[in-house]
Amino acid sequence: IRVPTIVTIMMLAIRDAVSDMSPYVRKTAANAIAKLYALDPELKDELILIIAKLLADKTILVNGSAVQAFEHVCPERIDLIHKNYRRLCNLLVDIDEWGQVTVLNMLTRYARSQFVDPDKTFEDDKKNFYENETEQNDNDDEDSLDKKTYVMDSDHRLLLRCTKPLLQSRNSAVCII
């Protein structure tokens, strides 16, 4: 129902549902957040507080919907993911199939913004194609000493390790990401 007068009633219902004992009720509340935000974008600050609570939920049933709400309402608020990153990575295999797609997209975006790109660390070592070969031979010894080795961050490694089993997923959307 897209009636602006029910926005306050929906907000009260979502606040109560987020604290409910049943994970199904909390999941439904997470799904309702995006619809409420579409009705009234001015509620963004209040909804972010609710999303933060849902992202910290320990139940795998809620996590996919919580990340979906996060993606709709405040995808720029990466700080909400910092606290829950490791737990989301470890629970990724157990989240429902379509929730995996959403969480995987969000974690990929997070990884691209928070971790060092392994390819960029070696760009300085690449030579220009048309560079003079005589200069190259003189500098080879110096370059071998200056080469940097990339050491992968433990959280970056965690993401890769936790996503590897998803390559065997029945959902092709999970494998494509």
Image (cartoon, grey):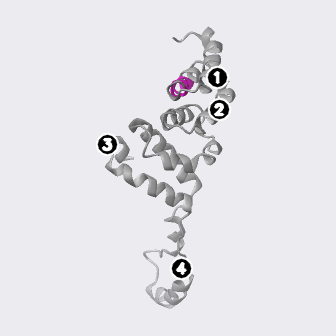
Per the model, the C-alpha gap separating discs 2 and 4 is: 44 Å
**Amino acid bearing label 2:** Ile
Dividing the picture into quarters, in which one does residue 26 lie? top right
Q: Which residue is identified by label 2?
A: 48
Q: What's drawn in magenta, residue-wise?
A: 26-34
In 3D space, how far apart are the residues under numbered discs 2 and 1 (Cα atoms)?
12 Å
* Residue under label 4: 147
Q: Who is closer to the viewer here, 24 or 73?
A: 24
Callout 4: 10 Å neighbours few (<14), some, many (20+)?
A: few
Crowding at mark 2 (Cα within 10 Å: few <14, some 14-19, many 20+): some
Q: Residue at x 55, y 62 (%)?
A: 154
Return the disc, 3 or 1, that comes first in the chain's sequence: 1
Residue 108 appears anywhere in the view: no
Q: Amino acid at mark 1?
A: Arg
Q: Which residue is mark 1?
A: 15
Which mark is nearer the camera, 4 or 1?
Answer: 1
Give the mark nearer the N terminus: 3 vs 4.
Answer: 4
Residue 133 vertical position relative to residue 80 in the rendered view, above or below? below
Q: Which mark is residue 118?
A: none
Q: Are marks 3 and 4 in contact (CB under 8 Å)?
A: no
Distance (Cα) linking label 3 and label 1: 35 Å
Question: Quick one: SS at disc 4?
Answer: loop
How far from the left and from the top, in percent, is residue 133? 44, 85
Q: Which residue is mark 3?
A: 172
Q: Which element type, helix, strand or loop, lies under badge 2?
A: helix
